[in-house]
Image (cartoon, coloured by chain):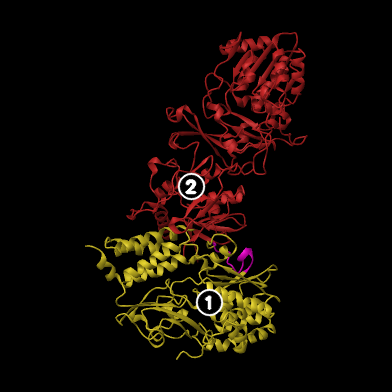
């Protein structure tokens, strides 16, 4: 039912991270092909593929690449976002560990498409093994002559802040500054890393590029829905029988993912709720899981595909406690740069905690909803909007559970 | 030039003007904290939201350049609701300690809460606690709990002084302003961070707890600290004299002048007013009787000066000061003409030469060297002292300078002063030179009178009286005017402005200038024949 595996096709080989294994499996043939292609043709192929960013925002990749100003004469940078920090998401970790050359090949092709000679890979600081594997692969690629002939790769390790996974926070951090998101405009494609046009793409997104070049954008588009092509890797965690990563077409439903791939619900066996796209995605009730997992399918369901981190909760899970954990995360990780997010994340965490501890007031729930709604859309980056997803959906969909904790 | 509409008013602005400034030109205030016209755009406070037609939601005005055909609304229901929310967020962790906060009365949290907040507080949980009363440097005190993290102070130290002492540390609602390890906020412009702090987070160690700001009176003025002539406001405490231990000048604040100092002043100028209320102020005319200087009345003092100047035998000389106003110097010029004094100078090399930087501070620490040059008082002071030593001077009138604290050898100066039968001293404060004088005529400090200075670029700028002169002190122009009167030279001037009119009539560089024309921003003198006056007068 899952169809062909693209991103994870080599994962079962114990030596999948090596250049030899990657080549044996047909690696770097897309790069051979791409070198004969005009950059514009590569961009066009990726546009046709309907590849959308798999880091969280779901922006059409080819379109993003075409935002580089045509008249720019200085350097253009490619930045790979490997700061995978969205709670419930662990796909890029596997890609870096098990198929690092797929990312390098994708970077070679992407750099050609956007005329970049320097690529930065920003790897989450806690990802030690992925960093080792990836830097080893970079060394191999230099030795083999893939890198160093038109593309230099700089690997940069993060220092443990969620906000450095936000693309402009990442750029600030990469530049040696505090990882604060930048105000937009200007957007990174116009003025990004070190003031130069920059394309920031997620690891998984770029790993798809060789397949698109090898087999054509139309083929890739055909694997998915009308508005999103290909497959993606779902990180499934929580109360399921077989937690882990699963590659599937984006047209798979949440129900199929939970029951067919991840083996169904544990705990008391009865599903209560699912977070479908990382902690920032709005929660779905058990009766809302017949939804396709593509960007637009989940948007229509009032949630988002996000990073495809699927967190499953059975009926024994307390939603208020789950919200407290999530709210603590956002309060802890808010960068503090702009006011609504800095103040509201801490405030809301305190209120939720008080409710969970049995000291709630009857007006608390409306205060949280109001503060979340009023802060939404007022901030520099999408962090607070990401926090608003759980604030609103957990309370709106499970209000009874919260009210039961508030003394009358 | 982009032409846009704000609240229905059409307005044309220069390209690149942001919506806060564009609205300001249309007479519309958009509330904001982090935006400052002298600093880069931070976009952090999120208070300056406006509605723009075709935009899906309110947008920050500070980071939006005016565009042709843009239609902007600053008072829609949606904008008002957003502002109110942002105010609530700003105050969630604020300690609300206005009763003990120095900023109260000029705090933008208070002002904007009253204008745009007025919500029912909903915060019932414990607030985040942060360091309080942390000295950041010699002049600035931090209360991190009051800070709204607008980053203006950080940007000031990064972008204006380039010294980079400050940063924002930690994350989320634990974020706080602080010093980088091993650093101190001791750059020469550090006081400006207090001015640009919109709340009570950064307060002035010199000013705090002195007097409530609503008891202060204000006068527009010019800093006398160097030849730049930074525009300032003088804040004085006249209404609560029992506060601040009798200190009348509470503080100096920079006043915007695009051509001179923009929004800033240096610390040396800001904290250089201590002499005004110092215990060594000269309060009454004094006359030497033996070893003592005893108080006398003005009439007696003026008569004594006039009598000395009327003596036919022997020479008289005047050492004027580049710290005196143009009006005073014009009066001195008239006196020299009327009394036949041929030797008038003003340049005395300072004991400690000033250094300068490329922001504001000038090596010449005098506010009116250029004026003294233009008025034609640039005689050789060294020659005057040489004449004195040679016994060729009978009367020497020294204004302001402590000649015994100059770059000249003290012994030479002392011999000169001792050789002059009548040494007259006019100044604000006592010093080694005044102590040797036979006659001491107390002068009003610059904040106690009005007048003009001409800065090193030739800009003539007015300063106004903020206070009454201390004791019986008088402005120099009045002292000199009374002497002129006593010498039988009629003086029509009863105000500084009259002397300025005379100056404008007598000195071509000032032709056409009037107090009215100078306004609050000053005016340039007519093109000067010689180059700008050198420092070190």
Q: Is residue B411 visible?
A: yes
Residue B186 falls left or right of residue A242: right
Q: Name the secondary structure under disc 2.
A: loop
The subunit letter for the residue under badge 2 reads B
Q: Residue at x 44, y 67 (%)?
A: A385
Pair 2/1: label in front:
1
**Chain whose colour in the figure is yellow:** A
Residue placed most toward the observer, A107 or A339:
A107
The residues bearing labels 2 and 1 have C-alpha atoms spaced at a distance of 41 Å
**Crowd class of label 2 (few under 14; some 14 to 19; many from 20; radius 10 Å):** many
Up-down: is B230 above or below B70? above
* SS class, disc 1: loop
Mark 1 — on which chain does it sit? A
Bounds of the magenta segment: A182-197
Q: Position of residue A38 (x, y in %)?
A: 68, 81
Q: In terms of image quadrants, where is residue B291?
A: top right
Left or right, B505 with reference to A234? right
Q: Position of residue A171 (x, y in %)?
A: 57, 65
Q: Quadrant of the C terminus of chain A?
A: bottom left
Q: Colour of chain B?
A: red
| Disc 2: which residue | B198
> Principal SS element in the magenta part?
loop
Q: Looking at the rendering, which quadrant does residue A195 occupy?
A: bottom right
Quarter holding the N terminus of chain A is bottom left
* Residue A258 percent across, percent down from the top left: 39, 84
Q: Which residue is mark 1?
A: A53
Q: Residue at x 35, y 63 (%)?
A: A368
- Position in image of residue B225 (x %, y %): 62, 33
Left or right: A187 with respect to B307? left
Q: Is residue B227 above or below residue B302?
A: below
């Amino acid at each position: 039912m899952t169809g062909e595996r693209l991103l994870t096709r080599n994962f079962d080989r114990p030596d999948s991270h090596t250049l030899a294994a990657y080549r044996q499996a047909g690696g770097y043939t897309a790069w051979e092909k791409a070198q004969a292609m005009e950059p514009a043709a590569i961009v066009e192929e990726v546009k046709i593929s309907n590849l959308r960013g798999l880091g969280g925002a779901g922006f059409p990749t080819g379109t993003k690449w075409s935002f580089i100003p045509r008249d720019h004469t200085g350097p253009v940078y490619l930045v790979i976002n490997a700061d995978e920090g969205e709670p419930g998401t662990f796909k890029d970790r596997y890609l870096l560990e098990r198929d690092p050359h797929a990312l390098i090949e994708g970077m070679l092709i992407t750099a050609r498409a956007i005329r970049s000679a320097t690529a930065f890979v920003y790897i989450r600081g806690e990802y030690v093994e992925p960093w080792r594997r990836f830097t080893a692969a970079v060394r191999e690629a230099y030795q083999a002559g893939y890198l160093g002939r038109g593309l230099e790769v700089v690997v940069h390790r993060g220092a443990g802040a969620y906000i450095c996974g936000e693309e402009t926070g990442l750029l600030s951090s990469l530049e040696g500054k505090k990882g604060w998101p930048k105000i937009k405009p200007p957007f990174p494609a116009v003025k990004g890393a070190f003031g130069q046009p920059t394309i920031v793409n997620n690891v998984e997104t770029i790993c798809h590029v060789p397949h698109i070049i090898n087999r054509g954008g139309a083929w890739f588009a055909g694997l998915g829905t009308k508005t999103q092509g290909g497959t993606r890797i779902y990180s499934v965690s929580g109360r399921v029988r077989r937690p882990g990563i699963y590659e599937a077409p984006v047209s798979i439903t949440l129900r199929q993912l939970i029951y067919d791939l991840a083996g169904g619900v544990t705990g008391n066996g009865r599903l209560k709720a699912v977070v479908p796209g990382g902690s920032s995605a709005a929660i779905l009730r058990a009766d809302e899981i017949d939804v396709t997992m593509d960007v637009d399918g989940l948007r229509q369901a009032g949630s988002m595909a996000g990073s495809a981190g699927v967190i499953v909760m059975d009926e024994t899970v307390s939603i208020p406690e789950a919200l407290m954990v999530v709210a603590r995360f956002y309060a802890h990780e808010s960068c503090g740069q702009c006011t609504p997010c800095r103040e509201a994340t801490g405030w809301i965490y305190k209120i939720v905690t008080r409710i969970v501890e049995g000291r709630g007031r009857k007006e608390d729930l409306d205060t949280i909803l109001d503060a979340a709604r009023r802060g939404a859309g007022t901030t520099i980056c999408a962090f607070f909007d990401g926090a608003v997803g759980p604030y609103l959906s957990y309370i709106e969909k499970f209000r009874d559970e919260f009210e039961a904790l508030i003394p009358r | 030039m982009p032409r846009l509409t704000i609240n229905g008013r059409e307005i044309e602005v220069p390209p690149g003007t942001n919506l806060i400034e564009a609205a300001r030109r249309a007479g519309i205030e958009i509330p904001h904290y982090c935006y400052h016209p002298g600093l880069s755009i931070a976009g952090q406070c999120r208070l300056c939201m406006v509605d723009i037609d075709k935009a899906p939601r309110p947008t920050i005005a500070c980071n939006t350049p005016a565009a042709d055909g843009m239609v902007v609304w600053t008072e829609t229901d949606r904008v008002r609701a957003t502002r109110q929310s942002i105010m609530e967020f700003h105050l969630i962790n604020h300690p609300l300690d206005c009763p003990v906060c120095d900023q109260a009365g000029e705090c933008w949290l208070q002002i904007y809460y009253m204008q745009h907040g007025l919500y029912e507080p909903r915060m019932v949980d414990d607030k985040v606690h942060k360091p309080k009363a942390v000295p950041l440097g010699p002049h600035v005190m931090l209360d991190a709990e009051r800070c709204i993290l607008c980053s203006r102070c950080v940007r000031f130290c990064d972008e204006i002084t380039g010294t980079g002492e400050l940063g924002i540390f930690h994350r989320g609602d634990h974020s706080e302003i602080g010093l980088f390890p091993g650093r101190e906020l001791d750059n020469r412009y550090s006081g400006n961070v207090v001015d640009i702090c919109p709340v009570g987070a950064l307060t002035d160690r010199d000013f705090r707890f002195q007097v409530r700001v609503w008891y202060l009176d204000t006068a527009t003025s010019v800093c006398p600290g160097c030849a730049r002539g930074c525009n300032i406001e003088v804040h004085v405490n006249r209404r609560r004299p029992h506060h601040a231990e009798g200190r009348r000048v509470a503080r100096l604040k920079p006043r915007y002048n695009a051509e001179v100092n923009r929004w800033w002043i240096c610390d040396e100028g800001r904290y250089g007013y201590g002499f005004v209320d110092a215990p060594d102020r000269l309060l009454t005319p004094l006359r030497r009787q033996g070893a003592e200087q005893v108080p006398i009345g003005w009439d007696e003092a003026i008569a004594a000066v006039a009598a000395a100047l009327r003596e036919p035998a022997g020479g008289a000389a005047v050492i004027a000061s580049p710290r005196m106003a143009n009006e005073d110097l014009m009066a001195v010029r008239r006196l020299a003409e009327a009394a036949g004094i041929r030797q008038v100078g003003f340049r005395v090399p300072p004991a400690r030469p000033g250094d300068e930087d490329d922001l504001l501070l000038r090596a010449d620490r005098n506010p009116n060297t250029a004026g003294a040059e233009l008025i034609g008082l640039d005689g050789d002071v060294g020659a005057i002292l040489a004449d004195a030593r040679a016994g060729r001077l009978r009367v020497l009138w020294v204004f302001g300078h402590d000649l015994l604290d100059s770059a000249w050898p003290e012994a030479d100066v002392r011999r000169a002063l001792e050789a002059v039968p009548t040494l007259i001293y006019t100044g604000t404060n006592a010093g080694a030179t005044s102590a040797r004088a036979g006659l001491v005529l107390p002068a009003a400090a610059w904040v106690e009178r009005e007048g003009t200075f001409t800065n090193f670029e030739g800009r003539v700028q007015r300063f106004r009286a903020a206070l009454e002169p201390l004791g019986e002190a008088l402005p120099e122009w009045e002292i000199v005017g009374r002497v002129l009167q006593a010498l039988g030279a009629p003086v029509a001037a009863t105000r500084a402005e009259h002397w300025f009119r005379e100056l404008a009539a007598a000195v071509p560089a000032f032709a056409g200038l009037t107090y009215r024309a100078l306004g609050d921003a000053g005016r340039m003198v007519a093109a000067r024949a010689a180059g700008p006056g050198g420092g070190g007068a």
